[in-house]
Image: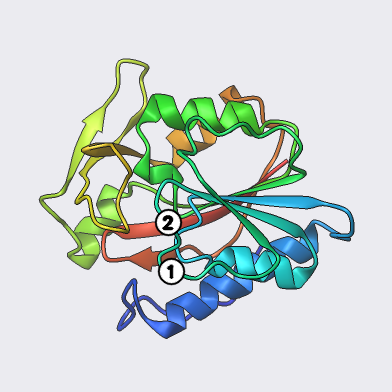
């Protein structure tokens, strides 16, 4: 699904232009899902509640789940906030699942487990993907991200987490799948389709992608 995006030059992962793009793509995906009336959206790893608020405005009943308290200190009216680790949080009763900026902060086995538990409901994913050629071409290499392979045959990279608000909760490191690998994980976790939003956008580590799994 194509979508206009400004060029990577001059953008960084905290720019307002980049945030605007992410929110517009998220709105597009929500519209793709149809009428929100009577449907419950859960935002896993909700952080500052930016996307949870967007889903609420769109008309969903919204639950925001994060292992840390709301980053702003505010709980928004109409959003049920749950303090819990997403790796243990039950997903029964939710109609649409958001994994926005979270998947790549988990280890591979945790990613697979979470995706399997989401199966059967539309699931929105925004994640980093490992793209070594692009990283080299744009000069985005970091000592925190190192190429790696798994015993299951997946290729990607390990990320050294920082333990700040934007990092994994509890994991000293996480795993970034490359693009063939993440599509393989989707398929092996039981998903029948993955809608890819084009083009990708960029963080200071390389390429990021939006997917809608159904």
Assess whether mark 1 and mark 2 are in contact (beta carbons under 8 angstroms).
yes
Quick check: 94 above or below 134? above
At 26% from the left and 49% from the top, the residue drawn is 132
**Image mark for residue 73:** 1
For the N terminus, which image quadrant? bottom right
In the image, residue 207 above or below residue 191? below
Q: What residue occupies the far top of the structure in this picture?
A: 151
Q: Is residue 69 left or right of residue 122?
A: left
Snapshot quadrant of residue 101: bottom left
Question: Residue 100 vs residue 54: left or right?
Answer: left
C-alpha gap between disc 2 and disc 1: 7 Å
Q: Which residue is mark 2?
A: 69
Q: Secondary structure at mark 1?
A: loop
Q: Residue at x 74, y 42 (%)?
A: 94
Query: Relative to the observer, which residue lies in front, 27 or 75?
Result: 75
Residue 48, x across and y down, in percent:
46, 66
- Dividing the picture into quadrants, the one containing residue 119 is top right
Q: Secondary structure at mark 2?
A: loop
Report whether 84 appears left or right of 42. left
> Callout 1: 10 Å neighbours few (<14), some, many (20+)?
few
The x and y percentages for residue 92 are 72, 32
Nearest the eye: 50 or 208: 50
Task: Residue at 39%, 48% (x, y): give it.
Answer: 129
Callout 2 crowding tier (Cα within 10 Å): few <14, some 14–19, many ≥20: some
Residue 120 picture location, percent across and down: 75, 32
Give percent across and percent down for residue 13.
34, 71
Residue closest to the eye, 203 or 9: 203
């Amino acid at each position: 699904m194509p979508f206009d995006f400004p060029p990577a030059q001059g953008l960084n992962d905290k720019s307002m232009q980049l945030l605007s793009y992410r929110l517009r793509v998220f709105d597009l995906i929500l519209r793709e899902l149809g009428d929100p009336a009577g449907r419950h959206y859960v935002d896993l790893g909700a952080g500052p509640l930016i996307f949870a608020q967007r889903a609420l405005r769109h008309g969903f009943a919204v639950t925001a789940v994060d292992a840390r308290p709301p980053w702003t200190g505010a709980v928004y009216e109409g959003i049920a906030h749950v303090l819990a680790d997403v790796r243990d949080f039950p997903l029964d009763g939710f109609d649409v699942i958001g994994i926005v900026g979270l998947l790549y902060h988990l280890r591979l086995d945790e990613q697979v487990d979470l995706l399997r538990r989401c199966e059967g409901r539309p699931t929105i994913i925004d994640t980093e993907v490992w793209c070594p050629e692009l990283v080299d071409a744009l000069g985005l290499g970091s000592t925190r991200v190192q190429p790696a392979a798994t015993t299951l045959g997946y290729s990607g990279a390990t990320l050294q987490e920082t333990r700040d608000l934007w990092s994994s909760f509890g994991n000293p490191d996480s795993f970034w799948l490359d693009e063939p690998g993440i599509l393989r994980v989707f398929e092996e976790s039981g998903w029948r389709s993955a809608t890819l939003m084009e083009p990708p956008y960029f963080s200071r580590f390389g390429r990021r992608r939006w997917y809608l799994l159904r």
